[in-house]
Amino acid sequence: MTGRALGCLPAKALPRQPRLAGLRMMARHAPPVLDRSHVDSGSLMFGNDTLGDCTAAGLLNHMRAVAALGGWQVQADTDDAIRFYAESTGYRPGQPATDQGGVEADVLAYAARIGVQLESGNYFPLWGSADPQDRNALALVMAGMGAVYLGVQLAQSDMNQIEATNGACVLEPDNSAYGDTTPGSAGGHCLLGWSYTGLADTDTLDLLTWGTIQRATWGWLKSRIMEAHGIVWPQLTLASGLYPTGPDLDALKAQNADLLNNDP
């Protein structure tokens, strides 16, 4: 069985946190289906089998997913993920007591200010948050920004079901046959929403986590989600007309600048 660690701390809102709600692209109706079965997202474990670095792993996998949609790939390895995890949180390599996970908003703000350092250069994201219960918004972020960066509260039943099936399952909100279904009873986790078969509660999503795809229903995500963020990498390209451009990109830049310029 594959080791699976968590590491997403409770969601928090930053003063002047960027928001996606005002962007023109967010006023659209999301595609009814987002099929990416023909695209290899390039998702990697990035050390999240033993460390609670899911916030860092999710960010690097977001970069790789966007690059894959553009027909190429960003080279990154576990050392890159662990280095960024240490930089963006209080983790100190070799000191297990400091492996406490990360807050998604803090990690995104850090990345926007300092960058994600890879051999190919420094990558600086623009980001904004969406209402985690707005399904159309989550789907639009997947379609228009490559993937949606999610924070979820996993139940112990989720972890038990994934372990029992080695991930070959569809997570549903009531999987009580596998134990406690209370959201958060296992802990918080950062993962990516990648694609979906439809927008109804019983339709399924492909979630990028632990170096693979985990399927779940929208109903499951509705019951477990605590936050959602869209990320744009100006250094990368996405082969889609929905990718933020013009006034939307300008608005994101302005919001991110406001956050960084007023960061204490």
Image: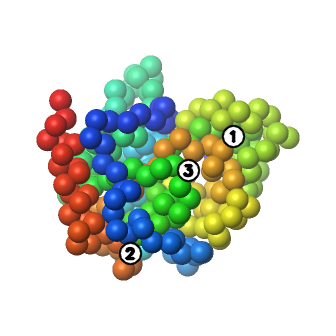
Asked if labels 2 and 1 touch by Cβ distance under 8 angstroms, the answer is no
Residue 201, given in percent of the width and then of the height, sits at 70, 59
Above or below — where is 218 with respect to 157? below
Residue labelled with disc 3: 133
Hey, what amino acid is under mark 1? Answer: Met
User: Which residue shows up at 32% across the image and 36% down it?
Assistant: 14
On-image quarter of the C terminus: top left
User: Which residue shows up at 41% across the image and 65% down it?
Assistant: 26
* Mark 3 or 2: the one toward you: 3
* Mark 3 or 1: the one toward you: 3
Residue 63, given in percent of the width and then of the height, sits at 36, 60
Above or below — where is 34 with respect to 220? below
151 left or right of 86?
right
State the CA–CA distance, disc 3 to disc 2. Answer: 21 Å
Hey, what amino acid is under mark 3? Answer: Gln
Residue labelled with disc 1: 159
Q: Is residue 45 visible?
A: no
Disc number placed over residue 140 in the picture, else none: none
Q: Earlier in the sequence, mark 3 or mark 2?
A: 3
Q: Earlier in the sequence, mark 3 or mark 1?
A: 3
Residue 205, given in percent of the width and then of the height, sits at 62, 62
139 left or right of 22?
right
Local SS, label 2: loop
150 left or right of 19?
right
State the CA–CA distance, disc 3 to disc 1. Answer: 23 Å
Hey, what amino acid is under mark 2? Answer: Leu
Q: Is residue 223 visible?
A: yes
Residue labelled with disc 2: 242
